[in-house]
Amino acid sequence: MAEPISAPILRRADYRLSEEEQALAEAFSAFFERSCPSERVRAAEPWGFDAALWAELAPMRPVAMGLPESLGGDGAGLVELVLVTEPFGRSVAPVPLVEAAVAARLLAAVATAAPGGPADAWVNQVIDEHKVVTLALQPGGGPQLVPAGAVADAVVGLLGDELVLGVCPAERAARRPRNHGFAPIAWCDLSDPECSFRPLWSGPSARAAFERAVREWKLLMASALIGMAQATLDIGVEHARSRVAFGAPIGSFQAVSHALADVAMAVETGRRLVRKGAWYAAHEPDEDVHRVLMAYRYATQTAMTAATVGVHVLGGVGFTVESDPQLYFRRVKGWTLVAGDPKAALSDIADALFGPVAIAK
Amino acid sequence: MAEPISAPILRRADYRLSEEEQALAEAFSAFFERSCPSERVRAAEPWGFDAALWAELAPMRPVAMGLPESLGGDGAGLVELVLVTEPFGRSVAPVPLVEAAVAARLLAAVATAAPGGPADAWVNQVIDEHKVVTLALQPGGGPQLVPAGAVADAVVGLLGDELVLGVCPAERAARRPRNHGFAPIAWCDLSDPECSFRPLWSGPSARAAFERAVREWKLLMASALIGMAQATLDIGVEHARSRVAFGAPIGSFQAVSHALADVAMAVETGRRLVRKGAWYAAHEPDEDVHRVLMAYRYATQTAMTAATVGVHVLGGVGFTVESDPQLYFRRVKGWTLVAGDPKAALSDIADALFGPVAIAK
Amino acid sequence: MDFGVIDLDEETVAFWAEVRAFCQTHVTKEVLDEEFETGSGFNEGLHKALGARGWILPTWPRQEGGAGATPLQAAILDAELRAAHAPLITLGTTRNVLPAVLRWGTDELKKAVVPGVASGDVRFCLGYTEPDSGSDIAAAKTRAVRDGDEWVIDGQKMFTTGAQNCQYSFLLTRTNPEAPKHKGLTMFLCPLEQAEIRPIRTLGGERTNMVFYDAIRVPDRYRLGPVDQGWMVLLGPLNAEHAMPEDTDSAPPIDQPGGMYGYSAVEGLEVALAWARSADPDGRRPIDDPLVRERLAQAALDIEVATVSTGPAGRVISSEMAIRVAEDLMDLVGPRALLPRGEDAAIGEGWLEYLHRFAQGTATYGGTTDIFRNIIAERFLGLPRQAPRAG
Amino acid sequence: MDFGVIDLDEETVAFWAEVRAFCQTHVTKEVLDEEFETGSGFNEGLHKALGARGWILPTWPRQEGGAGATPLQAAILDAELRAAHAPLITLGTTRNVLPAVLRWGTDELKKAVVPGVASGDVRFCLGYTEPDSGSDIAAAKTRAVRDGDEWVIDGQKMFTTGAQNCQYSFLLTRTNPEAPKHKGLTMFLCPLEQAEIRPIRTLGGERTNMVFYDAIRVPDRYRLGPVDQGWMVLLGPLNAEHAMPEDTDSAPPIDQPGGMYGYSAVEGLEVALAWARSADPDGRRPIDDPLVRERLAQAALDIEVATVSTGPAGRVISSEMAIRVAEDLMDLVGPRALLPRGEDAAIGEGWLEYLHRFAQGTATYGGTTDIFRNIIAERFLGLPRQAPRAG
């Protein structure tokens, strides 16, 4: 456990991307911009999945890239993955990228630490067949809403101290609720015999791997949220430059320009928090876990504020379903709340920074 | 315990002042405006008391007015008192009005319910000699900072289930710390033998009376805070009308005008919360106690925001000790924090609205 | 000051009972389901049932189509209908426009429309906003050109909510493009038969409309007030919509939970409280968690603040409160708050999910919150008018 | 991306030790007490001791009065001095102005002042703000009129912090009142002997000054840059103060807790944490209360956000963070947080009490946060310039 701050900390604070990182970010930006205009997002409503888009994306190996080369992956890590999920979020693409990337890394951890089980084959299927495995974010049995559960080929979760993997039966539609974010969430119960959950790995390391996977989900989602915030900011700025009211572009009114400036500040700062969090998670995993939680908490707030400002700056038009800010407005909340109250991150940060609560005497 | 809301509640919502109430408010406004310009506030720094001003104020009977006619008071109540403490707060007058008014009412409650004790004589001294009795806001023994403790002739507090009154010895200066709000606070310990605390009244009624007195302090302070917020708003508006930057009065920039508009909204709304809280406390005491807590919480936030905006709108000048907004900035925090964390009011509101926490099973 | 419980006379108690019975009969689950489906803010059966009782204009005398109700009874009626979530947007716009019709309409026009308003057969919608003018209402470009005893109207209006259920639009037109922008406007009570109505759906689930006026011809008798002085005619309904003080002071002084737009947040808090008081399988209740209690208390405080707020400030405060409360209560309740009305596992029939979407629109209705802050700064604080120069 | 621990070579480790020893010797309790008393942001002994080691301009070569330090060593020096709360406002303004002197000063002028800057004998303050112009710097009215080889300067400056300890003011004057406001300005490195300095005290306890220039005569050699082109001369120091990107990118990439103004909030959190970890007589610690934990975590998050922020955004974020954190931590800690440095029962030597006052000023230093938001909107987002017309 680290004190949050002590002076002077002699660490670099270099947020710049390397040339490779820059190329990676640009390649995925270009892909999502080209392949996933907002019409395609709308076309996938209300179920939030575009299988063709997933197939188009697959050759870029956004999931395989995060897996070790020893298992057939590309050996990249969280630093690279957040560069991919930011443009993914910017386009709110209807594909389960965050879940698939995180669950695959968890399976890879199992296949590495405890080879010989079903995880090995699933890793291959993820890489070769672009199968989607997702992560049940809440440990334990009982019904829970699982992100990407409605489109996943398998679900990984933690039951007791045991990592388990299950394949739910075909009548998935019944488990798939309509929802605020038009997301392919599904009801899933790790103790449901119908889904034939099988053990993958057990013990403290399995639990730690699960907890790390949940943090990775929050990290990649934080980056997606920053992308979503950037997108609504861009829409708002464009509108504020061109829309005229009271004889002037509305962007010349501080009520508009300062609201957008606040979002711009938060987006840029949130992006830096994400990158710093990703670097620590990649290079010093299981230490300073508060950084990922901080990035996640800040990103949820930033994206929600950005979406609200985006809807508002566009005025009445922003409130119509034809406008794009509302796409983000729904998904910011809809994609994240499945992980539970985002404000709970503060209590988690407190645990990480200040240690556990003392037992009452 | 009431649910916060159910529709439709058939109650009046009439915030208008009667002619008598209007006259009362105007009389005290006129007094404080005339008698307590900011120079007089400054002159009383750092100890926050102007004995001559207290003597000038006394003939208007701001303390006696809140006591029952049967004890020699004027039979007015909380509704009238908040109309007095708002202009008091507007001028941040260096007199212990809130404490004196509240403690006197507590003594009057004792003298009424349990006559024959020392409270009777103190009520007379308060009315006839304008003695200052103050209230120790924290129940129990141990050192605490008591508002107006440095200038009070006596302190009332709750020790166990017993209301006690004490007179601290003469070397008061040693107990009087310099402080953020330039307020006449003092260290006091209800179990300190040197202060010769004597019992006034005991039992559940005594405790209830003490708790009511603390709420009344919060109510009258809430009104003072609204006055303080109004004053900084007025200063900021005046400045924003006349100060020119970039070729226009700064009040024509929304960064300034909307910040002031937000304060104006909160001041007017906070005033209404206070009046509603006062009316309930006067007419339906011990019910709906959440209203006073709500008024207090909202007023602390409003006044702090108003002071911050006031300092900021005046720019560099606002940050100098010659400017008036900083007088308010110091006192908003300095006058209230002595009652403890203002955010704790939320937990108190929860207790009042939702009932106590269930014991863990 | 007076916040006392209002003594109700026998007649009012009976009226109240009648209103409750009416709501049970007419604001049925079917009506609500249809409203959630269509978002039209109107139900013809309900509207006519109100008209049949004189409750569209309840304080008007019976002989004029009203119910002779007291202002208090009218307030009870409104509060009960609101609590029942009756879809009454079109009732609201109709009532909002009526005073302008009475003040400026010819006797012939009034005779033609007013009885229908009272009975429910005639409804009005608001034709202010255009694709290029929203909060800056006076920038309207829809043209009205005189041609003998008729006017030819050409233009396009946005967000004419309820147009599909109305007979007339309270229409803002430009009759003199040369004059300063507030001086060349004329108002009409424009019949909608010739207009083309295209639906627009909102994030909040409401249906509103674009309305195209393609050289439609309107007899002069539908003009309201003098030519080129439409701004004066518009100001009454606009001020009412902007909740300027003169209007709220005349409203019956009844404590209305949540203020202008916050009533939906009141129900949101009730939903969250019900959730918080439910025990999980281990017997734990969220409401016993200090963090949960604090947030619920903050929501209750926010709602009370909106309740006491008034005028343009009340518009801003209640709207922003609803946005904030919806967001935080949704977070607090967690994943199941994502499920909409109709999903079995939805919390409180999906009310928070709906509120989170709906609340966003309240910051724009009848002018954005920015405009209301301008109003407060300029009219209440006397600050100079803001008017930026283009960069 | 790289956030790794920097490997320090032996020389740098030794440098660091030297800096720490220096701070212990020169930033004593007496120095700090004096600074809290006077608020002058300067201590002559300390300043000269820095000069003696070449640490006023640490990266300069030794032969030019520097210490030949690496950028990393210079950053360590600054961080240690800051952590020790060394009063270095005047060092900051001196360093801020120096590049403009080097760029625009004549060789004669540079020869006269630069060695003294390095040694600590010569200090510069900023003469921009006037009673009628703050954030709108270019509206300055202080006149400079040429008279042969001299200039006659008439006017008044506000907030010239450190003037009483400086030899020169980096002075903004108007030389052509007819020209557009940015085109008639000229900068001087104006000697202060003839100026009258009157102290101003701030809420934060700082001392600053009004400076009266009453027909003082300044030889032309003190002019910096061309006549009427002072805005260009001013821009370098101003951009540095505004934390425009070119500057921050050239700074050594070291993680600086709290960002631009937030370092004082870092210490505020440490004070609150120490309080929260102390047990009361019953053995209860505030830090075991979920509500307390959440607020401390929020403060830590706020500080980290400020830490990673940069440029003009960093200015706004770190300033507003410090204001918010000071207010909330003071509330959290309770009544004893009201007691200032020097009171026995003060929490953390009164740091929160000080922070709450001090933080307010950071929202105005070098232009208000409003100005920085304008900069972000206009220069980064490309939004049109705001410039209201008077009402």
Image: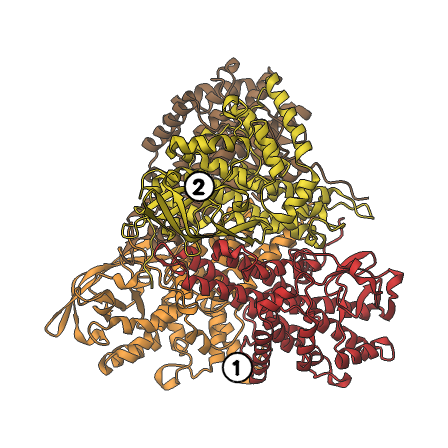
Chain colours: A red, B brown, C yellow, D orange
Name the side, left or right, on which D171 lies relative to A170. Answer: left
**Image height check: is B142 above or below A143?**
above
- Could you tell me if residue D234 is visible in this image? yes
**Image height check: is A153 above or below D351?**
below
Position in image of residue B90 (x %, y %): 40, 36
Q: Amino acid at mark 2?
A: His
Q: Amino acid at mark 1?
A: Thr
Q: Disc 2 designates what residue?
A: C242
Q: Disc 1 designates what residue?
A: D12
Name the side, left or right, on which C306 lies relative to D92. Answer: right
Name the chain letter of the residue that bears numbered label 2: C
How many other residues sit within 10 Å of disc 2, few (<14), some (14-19) or many (≥20)? many
**Image height check: is C105 above or below D320?**
above
Residue at 83% x, 65% y: name it: A170
Residue C188 or B334: which is nearer the viewer? C188
Position in image of residue C295 (x %, y %): 63, 46
How many other residues sit within 10 Å of disc 1, few (<14), some (14-19) or many (≥20)? some
Name the side, left or right, on which B316 lies relative to B1. Answer: left
Name the side, left or right, on which A20 lies relative to B69. Answer: right
The image quadrant that residue C98 belongs to is top left
Task: Point out the frontmost of discs 1 and 2.
Answer: 2
Name the chain letter of the residue that bears numbered label 1: D
Which element is circle 1 on? Answer: helix
Q: Residue furthest left?
A: D148
Residue C114 or B168: which is nearer the viewer? C114
Residue at 79% x, 79% y: name it: A125
Label 1, label 2: how far apart the Cα atoms are: 66 Å
The image quadrant that residue B105 belongs to is top right
